[in-house]
Image (spheres, rainbow, N blue to C red):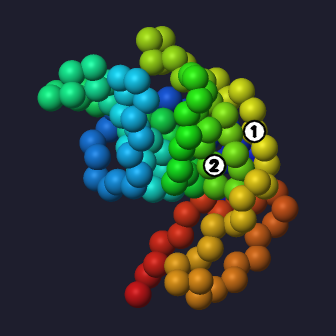
């Protein structure tokens, strides 16, 4: 994906069904469930016996999250981004981006090398057998 498109792809979207999961994080009354290389489902967990699927944070190339105060730190493929979501008014502010913090996403089974231009980012792989 072109870097310009990649850097503007992070969004706060309406809730979507969970079809694939990664790591799960808990912060106050919220649950964050990773959809690998795609983003995070956000649940209101005020009532743990009935969590409410309330939003999806689209962050391409994401697999991990850390939260300090109200800031979410997420790997965005090769970049580290700091986000400040506001679930009340459905907004999302990227407060910081540190480009090329992480290595390029390796191909499945580390089988291949793919040359990419300086203005491109690998956000995911699909293994076709």
| In this picture, residue 77 sits left or right of residue 51 | right
Residue 97, disc: 1
Give the mark count.
Answer: 2
Q: Earlier in the sequence, mark 2 or mark 1?
A: 2
Can you name the residue that lies furthest to the right here? 118
Q: Secondary structure at mark 2?
A: strand
Q: Secondary structure at mark 1?
A: strand
Residue 33 lies, in percent from the top left, at 38, 43
Q: Residue at x 40, y 24 (%)?
A: 28
Q: Determine whether 106 is above or below 18 in the image.
A: below
| In this picture, residue 30 sits left or right of residue 108 | left
Residue 34 lies, in percent from the top left, at 42, 48
Residue 76, disc: 2
Q: Residues within 10 Å of mark 2 (few under 14, many from 20)?
A: many
Which quadrant: the C terminus? bottom left
Residue 59, disc: none
Q: Residue at x 63, y 49 (%)?
A: 76
Q: Tell me whether the residue at label 2 lies in contact with that at label 1, contact meaning CB atoms closer than 8 angstroms.
A: yes
Q: Residues within 10 Å of mark 1 (few under 14, many from 20)?
A: some
Residue 14 appears in the figure: no
Q: Residue at x 81, y 66 (%)?
A: 117
The image quarter containing residue 104 is bottom right
Q: Determine whether 60 is above or below 53 in the image.
A: below
The image quarter containing residue 51 is top left
């Amino acid at each position: 994906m072109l870097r310009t498109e990649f850097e503007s792809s992070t969004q706060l979207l309406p809730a979507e069904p969970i079809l694939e999961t990664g790591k799960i994080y808990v912060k106050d009354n919220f649950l964050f469930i990773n959809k690998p290389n795609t983003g995070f489902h956000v649940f209101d967990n005020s009532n743990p016996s009935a969590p409410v699927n309330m939003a999806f944070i689209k962050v391409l190339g994401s697999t991990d999250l850390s939260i300090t105060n109200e800031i979410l730190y997420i790997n965005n493929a090769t970049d580290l981004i700091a986000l400040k979501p506001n679930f009340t008014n459905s907004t999302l502010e990227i407060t910081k981006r540190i480009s090329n913090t992480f290595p390029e996403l390796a191909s499945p089974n580390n089988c291949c090398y793919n040359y990419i231009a300086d203005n491109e980012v690998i956000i995911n792989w699909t293994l076709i057998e």
